[in-house]
Amino acid sequence: MTQPTDEVVDHRPLIITGSGIAGLSAAIYAGRSNNDPLVFEGDEPGGQLTLTTEVDNYPGFPEGISGPELIQDMKSQAERFGAEIKNGAVEDVTADDRPFTVRLNNGDVYTADAVIAASGASARTLGIPGEDDLMGYGLSTCATCDGAFFRDEKILVVGGGDAAMEEANFLTKFASTVYIAHRREEFRAEDYWIDRVMEKVDDGEIEIMRNTEVTELHGSKEDGLDHVTLVSHPEGHPTGKLDDPDTETVEFDAGAVFYAIGHTPNTEYLEGTGVDLDDAGYLHTQGGDGGGQTATDVDGIFGAGDVVDHHYQQAATAGGMGVKAALDADDYLEELERGARAEASSDVAAAESDD
């Protein structure tokens, strides 16, 4: 890793970390407010939406739009209003003094009067063959986003927690049958969700594959997912027992696979600022029904999108949070400016009285 330097590359009123829907929505509004926003794209430029081939539920696009196209259009819109978008990921934000010091992973240093954290949350994956090629082409991490594309298909959900149970339940609206593959015998989900899934099992809409893991995805971007390789062992965690004679391998036909094994919020760079993070690393904001809903407990740092929201995780809700964050940041920056003007006036008055 490049060692950071002490030389400041640039100062901006506002820096936005992340270039997904939340970050770009914030950039559009911040640009229109003449706050000269600087957006750092992050490790995943465009965020999770760039992994979605078709977006049918974002308002204003009756025929749908691809995720990458929507992101590119939003970038162009933000730039039209004066936002600057740079490649780079923020490694650290220092809040000991003002302005904030923002260090990138290439060693560059910037300063800002306010920071909007819109760095999102990365969906966890299995790291198996076929993932990279089929993400967005039969493999998804968002049932609400992509479930409707796989009507009357056999759909496999991977996971055993609340998210997996909820996604499987939702996908029964579209699938011929939903299959849940879980590496253990027992689920980690709350009883509420297990009960709802078992009702669907009784109705023949869901089938459960216990002690089962996916080891490979087969297909192509042109033709989509064809089938998956599954391994199972009666004692669970079969990928750790591949040489065991009791481990079975099967090829399973499926139209789509949905991972529901959690997300990791991208908040490591905020850990030294004093902001409040929950046990999973999600950023706490003020909430409520008035202004300042996206403010954190550190003045000048605001949060928007999946870095805050571990429940809805939708493009439209992330965009709305980005707008709120830009408006809250604008109020904060205006207050800073008023304070600076008052201090300058006081200094002038004091100098005149000395004369």
Image (tube, helix red, strand yellow):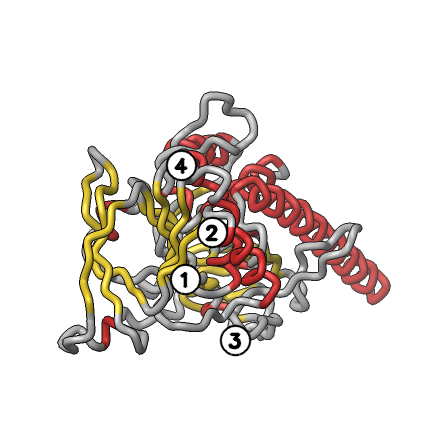
Q: Name the residue beneath numbered marker 1.
A: 159
Residue displayed at 25% across by 46% down: 253
Residue displayed at 37% across by 72% down: 184
Of the two numbered discs 3 and 4 on the same chain, state the one appearing first in sequence: 4
Q: Residues within 10 Å of mark 1 (few under 14, many from 20)?
A: many
Amino acid type indicated by mark 1: Gly
- Mark 2 vs mark 1, CA separation in Å: 10 Å
- Mark 1 vs mark 3, CA separation in Å: 33 Å
Q: Are marks 2 and 1 in contact (CB under 8 Å)?
A: no
User: Which mark is in front, 3 or 2?
Assistant: 2
Q: Name the residue beneath numbered marker 3.
A: 272
Q: Are marks 4 and 2 in contact (CB under 8 Å)?
A: no
- Mark 3 vs mark 2, CA separation in Å: 38 Å
Of the two numbered discs 1 and 3 on the same chain, state the one appearing first in sequence: 1
* Residue 326 horizontal/vertical position (percent): 62, 46
- Mark 3 vs mark 4, CA separation in Å: 33 Å
* Residue 324 horizontal/vertical position (percent): 66, 46
Q: Name the residue beneath numbered marker 2.
A: 168
Asked whether 315 or 200 is in front, the reply is 200
